[in-house]
Image (tube, helix red, strand yellow):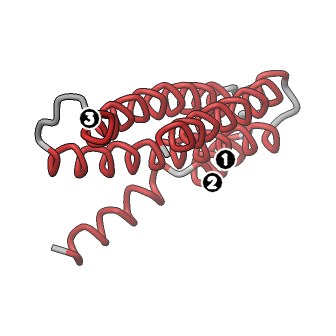
Amino acid sequence: MGLFRGFFGTFFKRLFSARTQYLLLSGQGATGSVRLGVTGIVMSVLGMLFSIGFTVLGALCAANLFSQEVGGEYKWPIASLIGAIAFFGLAACCCGVIMSGSSHALYQKRLNDRKVGTAAVIVSLVCLVVAVGTIVAALIVLL
């Protein structure tokens, strides 16, 4: 299973990576293309939205887990613990999607000096700050 996943994971990563798309576009002479910048913006925004959603779900699971200390109703403690860990982990993985969007944005800047490249870099950095800030704030409030 590991060999199968490793081969296809590497294959698809190389096939759809930002660097591969950049090399294809620069080899074709597509200096007017904005594909990488738009892809970077979409990936960053979706990654931020999913990260915030998973953080909220993780906080709800953790709040249920900590409700016994406050004197509230306590249901499914093991499921709440596993859910909180899983949802916060998924939120952190979504930050990786935002970083991939940043990579696409930087390759757009390298491909041509259009305004969409600069906008994509700014959007991806703002999305990363918002996503990481949301995760950190939720963890600080819960602890």
**Vertical position of residue 23 compared to residue 1: above or below:** above
Label 3 vs label 2, nearer the camera:
3
Query: Can you identify the residue that label 3 sits on?
Result: 64
Query: Can you identify the residue that label 1 sits on?
Result: 103
Report the residue that reaches farthest toward the front: 71
Instruction: Say whether marks 3 and 2 touch (CB < 8 Å).
Output: no
Sequence-earlier tag: 1 or 2: 2
Which amino acid type is shown beneath numbered disc 3? Asn
Which amino acid type is shown beneath numbered disc 2? Arg
> What kind of element bears circle 1?
helix
Q: Nearer the viewer, residue 100 or 138?
A: 138
Calculate the distance from the C-alpha at mark 3 to the C-alpha at mark 1. Answer: 37 Å
**Vertical position of residue 118 compared to residue 26: above or below:** above
Q: Nearer the viewer, residue 131 or 66?
A: 66
Where's residue 19, x and y in %? 63, 54
Report the residue that reaches farthest toward the left: 76
Please tell me which residue is depicted at 54% across the width and 40% down the height of the picture.
Answer: 135
Query: Can you identify the residue that label 2 sits on?
Result: 19
> What kind of element bears circle 2?
helix
User: Which corner quadrant of the image does residue 83 belong to?
Assistant: top left
Calculate the distance from the C-alpha at mark 3 to the C-alpha at mark 2. Answer: 43 Å
Where's residue 129, x and y in %? 69, 36
Sequence-earlier tag: 3 or 1: 3
Report the residue that reaches farthest toward the right: 113
Sequence-earlier tag: 3 or 2: 2
Instruction: Say whether marks 1 and 2 touch (CB < 8 Å).
Output: yes
Please tell me which residue is depicted at 76% across the width and 34% down the height of the picture.
Answer: 121
Quadrant where the N terminus lies? bottom left
> What kind of element bears circle 3?
helix
